[in-house]
Amino acid sequence: MRHIIAQHKYTFLSLVLICMMYLIYGQYYTPESIAQKAGTIIAGDEQGAITGHMGQGSPIIGGAFELVDNHGNVFTEENLKGKHSLVYFGFTYCPDVCPIGLQAMADAHDQLPKEVQDKVNLVFVTVDPERDDPELLSHYLPNFSENMIGLTGTQKQVKDTAKAYKVYYAKDEREDLDALGNYLLNHSSYIYLMDTDGVTNIGFFKHEASPEVIRDGILQYAYK
């Protein structure tokens, strides 16, 4: 009997430790926590949309990747060089969060002076490569902006890119989502502002940030 009780005790303690590790990991690897640990400033607008600047010494967000664009061409971080980039991770079947973020990106871009618009990439990276192929992306993204670049790839390529950007995503396994067997994905929903080197993150916005907040965030760096 003592052996059984001890077994249950250690099993319970193990579960507690796993939960604690998950919570610590989740709190550490969000853009807000990364910016806070780097001693950077975070400000919110009236909608609670957060912007933040990634300071020196903070964990790296962004980096090298290899994907395929909505025209079927290989696309890497080299293709981002020379312009600032707004990068968002989501999927085309997303019912609400992704369209809000993508529309905010597109509207912010439209509000920029023409000479700045030409120096900003709008990038959408799917976390659902199983369904989001180049053809689907090429039909979906013009609903928001003709300037938006769609990126997909193999499961591994997408996973590696998401890891570089500290993006969380996972398939929702509930069986009652759709009678046809369609599924949704849970995912983090930050819009990343990348520097002109294509690999350095200089700021971020929540998906519900107003276009004006995103526009002003870009303009902080556009003329430097």
Image (tube, helix red, strand yellow):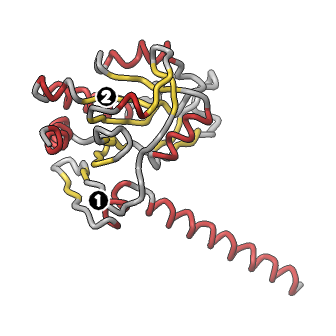
Which class describes the residues within 10 Å of circle 1: few (<14), some (14-19), or many (20+)?
some
Where is residue 212? Give x, y as percent.
Answer: 14, 38
In the image as oriented, which residue stretches furthest toward the left? 113
Query: At which x and y percent is residue 96?
Result: 38, 32
68 or 13, nearer to the observer: 68
Looking at numbered disc 2 in the image, what kind of residue is underneath it? Answer: Leu
Q: Residue at x 64, y 25 (%)?
A: 181
Secondary structure state at the residue bearing disc 1? loop
The disc placed on residue 64 is: none
Residue type at mark 1: give it. Answer: Gly
Horizontal and vertical percent position of residue 184: 54, 33
Left or right: 10 with respect to 160? right
Residue 175 at x, y percent in the picture: 65, 35
Q: Quadrant of the C terminus?
A: top left
Horizontal side of 79 relative to 159 (left or right) equals left
Residue at the extreme bottom:
2
Which residue is located at x 33 percent, y 42 percent? 192
Q: Which residue is mark 1?
A: 55
The disc label shown at residue 122, or none: 2
Q: Is residue 29 above or below residue 209?
A: below
Classify mark 2: residues with Cα within 10 Å, few (<14), some (14-19) or many (20+): many
User: Which structural element holds mark 2?
Assistant: strand
Q: Marks 1 and 2, how far apart in space?
A: 23 Å
Name the quadrant of the N terminus: bottom right
- Specify the quadrant of the image occupied by residue 131: top right
For the residue pair 131 and 215, the one nearer the viewer reads as 215
